[in-house]
């Protein structure tokens, strides 16, 4: 694999942050934070389980998790991840509503059944989202996952569903 470019949202490289099973949206985006401006709300991500996490995240980082990642309500957590610069989510299994919200915000969300066996906290990971492959650059382990359908890749490539609809002329950019 050659190096990803900043211009391609479907090819990412970043440091892994690993979470367990059943991480819920209430922990990712506490209720009180929903009343705050977006950048301020990001400071409260994972307050209950990993205080101070958002201050350590750097643009391009990748969140890796276990099963049922994003359990809970339809809070716009993906918008917080995008605001922090998280480039990709990899989980052994996503809550279906959370998965769709992530993709709608243009955030690649990859299902990799052995994610936590193949990737540990702090590992450097390279992912070709459109190609269905990746590599743990720290260990050399290969990552293979199911390629998303073209229409989903187009949403992610566009920066999200809203941006795709603006570009196609279906939404007024001033109204977004």
Image (tube, helix red, strand yellow):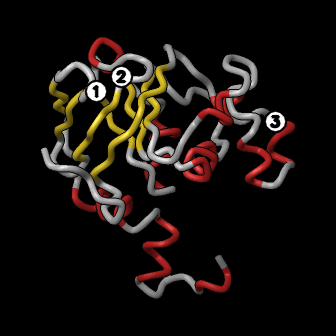
Q: Quadrant of residue 136?
A: top left
Q: Quadrant of residue 121?
A: top left
Which residue: 79% across, 48% down? 40
Relative placement, left or right, of 116 versus 50 is left
Q: Please give the label number shown on residue 92.
A: 2
Considering only order in the chain, which callout, 3 or 2, is on the residue closer to the N terminus? 3
Relative placement, left or right, of 61 versus 33 is left
Q: State yes or no: discs 2 and 3 in contact (Cβ < 8 Å).
A: no
Which residue: 53% across, 49% down? 85
Q: Circle 3: is it few (<14), some (14-19), or many (20+) Cα within 10 Å? A: few
| Quadrant assignment for the N terminus | top left
The residue beneath circle 3 is 31
Percent position of residue 39, x then y: 74, 52
Percent position of residue 119, x then y: 32, 20
Considering only order in the chain, which callout, 1 or 3, is on the residue closer to the N terminus? 3
Q: Please give the label number shown on residue 145.
A: none
Percent position of residue 148, x then y: 24, 48
Q: State yes or no: discs 1 and 2 in contact (Cβ < 8 Å).
A: yes
Could you give the CA–CA distance between mark 2 and mark 3, rounded to whole angstroms?
26 Å
143 or 170: nearer the viewer: 143
| Quadrant assignment for the C terminus | bottom right
Q: Circle 2: is it few (<14), some (14-19), or many (20+) Cα within 10 Å? A: many
SS at circle 1:
loop
The residue beneath circle 1 is 112
Relative placement, left or right, of 5 versus 47 is left
Could you give the CA–CA distance between mark 3 and mark 1, rounded to whole angstroms?
29 Å
Which residue: 37% across, 62% down? 155
Relative placement, left or right, of 135 versus 55 is left
């Amino acid at each position: 694999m050659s190096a990803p470019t900043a211009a391609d949202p479907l090819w990412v490289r970043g440091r892994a942050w690993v979470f367990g099973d059943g991480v819920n949206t209430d922990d990712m985006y506490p209720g009180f934070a929903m009343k705050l401006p977006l950048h301020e709300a990001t400071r409260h991500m994972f307050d209950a389980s990993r205080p101070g996490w958002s201050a350590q995240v750097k643009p391009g980082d990748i969140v890796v998790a276990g099963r049922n990642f994003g359990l809970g309500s339809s809070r716009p957590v993906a918008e917080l991840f995008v605001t922090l610069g998280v480039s990709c989510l990899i989980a052994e299994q996503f809550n279906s509503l959370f998965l769709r919200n992530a993709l709608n915000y243009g955030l690649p969300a990859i299902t990799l059944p052995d994610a936590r066996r193949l990737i540990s906290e702090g590992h450097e990971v390279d992912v070709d989202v459109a190609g269905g492959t990746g590599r743990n650059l720290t260990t050399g382990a290969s990552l293979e996952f199911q390629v998303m359908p073209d229409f989903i890749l187009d949403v992610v490539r566009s920066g999200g569903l809203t941006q795709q609809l603006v570009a196609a002329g279906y939404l007024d950019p001033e109204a977004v």
